[in-house]
Amino acid sequence: MEWRFLHPGFLALLPLPLIWLVWNHRARHRVPALVYSGISAWKSGGGTLRMRAYALLPWIRTLALLLGIIALARPQYGQVKRSQSAHGIDISLVLDISETMDLPDFEPDRLEVAKDVLLDFVEDRPTDRLSVVVFGTDAYVLVPPTFDRAAIETFLGSIDSRTLPREQRMTAIGLGLARAVEKLKDSTAESRVVILLTDGENTAGNIEPLQAAEAARALGIRVYTIGVGSNQTLRIPVRNMFGMTEFKSVTVTLDEETLGEIAEMTGGRYYRATDEDALRDIYGEIDRLERTEIETNEFDDFNERFMWLWTPALFLLLGEFFLRGVWLIRLP
């Protein structure tokens, strides 16, 4: 709820009554209405109720004019109501949770950083319907298409390195993409998008990534692919057969060629993220590319309040005319 003036330009007249008041005060003291030869007459006749009332007349008129000017500006109290209609986008977020996503070249690891970035992306898409697909050796719909951001955040937050057993943590990119396409194929949204994040190459599943991409293209689904991971060889601690910790060098092969082909076939883009900042920038760019068209309708729900000022202003003016013309007698 708020106050507003429908015609605020009238407020520019507010200084005029104050200027008149100052001018009137100076004029009255510059040209006396009656000249006395001494102050004895003033002492005997001064301070009467009528004289005090006469001194108030300029103030009454000034206040009446101020209230009248504010009333002319049309003060109103209420609110502007807004209704929004969105031509939404259906987005499927596909996340690799294979074993290599535990690598620590992102702090603390690739999976945790990817989750944090995804959660921020979800929060910035309030009008879109989102789904989440995760994949290792197989692919699973973690969250079906929904507008419930709390559910998405809860399920995304629950993913970690223990979500799947180690033997189920290979990389089925084709299956993950196919599962996302399956969830979007019946969507009636004007735009359907898949954002697929992985750090490896397809090593599992009975669907090749390019086969899934063909299906996406046939359905008019756009696919953005993101390859994550630094180019460096990583040394990670592992336990040997004697239970002792030793370090093993790990190099992850990222199939950038296939990821680029998937994006090109479907009208999307391929991105490479070698650190957290780059990954956030990528999701930020996709967020800008895939914006929801929102139509906003506004209508006013305001009540007039000028009568609250106009009525006392009118009574003040009538009171001044009565005092000046009936009760008070001004000496020439």
Image: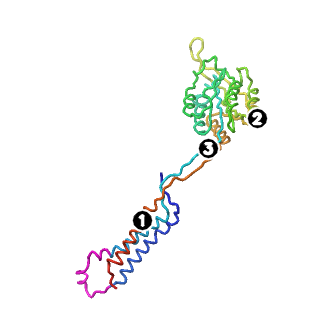
Q: Nearer the viewer, residue 52 or 97?
A: 52
Secondary element type, mark 1: helix
**N-terminal of the two: label 2 or label 1?**
2
**Residue behind mark 2:** 264
| Residue 213 point in image, percent of width and height | 74, 29
Q: Is residue 290 magenta?
A: no
Rendered view: 242 above or below 295: above
Q: Which residue is mark 3?
A: 85
Name the front one of labels 3 and 2: 3
Q: Residues within 10 Å of mark 1 (few under 14, many from 20)?
A: some
Image x and y of residue 207, in percent = 73, 22
Residue in the foreground of this view, choosing between 296 and 284:
296
The picture places residue 332, in percent across and down from the top left corner, at 34, 85
Q: Which residues are magenta?
A: 34-53
Which mark is drawn over residue 176?
none
Lower sequence index among marks 3 and 2:
3
Q: Position of residue 52 (x, y in %)?
A: 30, 74
Amino acid at pointer 2: Glu
Task: Point out the frontmost of discs 1 and 3.
Answer: 1
Q: CA distance from mark 2 to mark 1?
A: 72 Å
Residue at the location (27% across, 88% down)?
A: 37
Q: Where on the picture, by quarter, is residue 169?
A: top right
Residue 16 vertical position relative to residue 264 in the rendered view, above or below: below
The Cα–Cα distance between marks 1 and 3, rounded to whole angstroms, is: 43 Å
